[in-house]
Amino acid sequence: MDNEDNLTPWQRYKKNLGNTRPWDLLNVNAPKVSDVEAHARLDICKACPELIKATHQCKKCGCIMNLKVKLAAASCPIGKWDASAPSEE
């Protein structure tokens, strides 16, 4: 099932989520990035046509991006930004 066309909607959704899940935001121990990096990631998202401006939600992964950008393990489902090392803050 390497071909994206053969994936079910659920498989496509899980693939687009990458290494993070929405409930990772509730884990206080989940590694976070610095505020500067989170802001830079969000700026990229704000310029992306896949962002639903009213809800800050990504059309590809369904995540609320002003929250997802804070997770170190998170990445953009279309490759605009990658996972990074956690902040030492």
Image: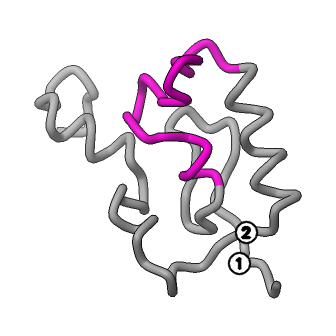
Residue most toward the top?
49
Kind of element beneath mark 1: loop
Callout 2, which amino acid? Val
In terms of secondary structure, what is the magenta stretch mainly? loop
Q: Position of residue 83 (x, y in %)?
A: 63, 61
Give the vertical position of 11 relative to 35 (above or below).
Answer: above
Q: Residue at x 42, y 28 (%)?
A: 60
Q: Residue at x 56, y 67 (%)?
A: 73
Q: Which class describes the residues within 10 Å of circle 2: few (<14), some (14-19), or many (20+)?
A: many
For residue 34, which quarter of the picture?
Answer: bottom right
For residue 12, which quarter of the picture?
Answer: top left
Nearer to me, 2 or 60:
60
- Residue named by callout 1: 86
Tag 1–tag 2 contact (CB < 8 Å): yes
- Residue 11 painted magenta: no
Give the vertical position of 70 relative to 62 (above or below).
Answer: below
Callout 1, which amino acid? Pro
**Mark 1 to mark 2: distance in Å?**
5 Å
Give the position of the N terminus as an image quadrant.
top left
Nearer to me, 12 or 28:
28
Q: Residue at x 82, y 62 (%)?
A: 35
Nearer to me, 62 or 16:
62
Give the position of the C terminus as an image quadrant.
bottom right
The residues colored magenta run 48-69
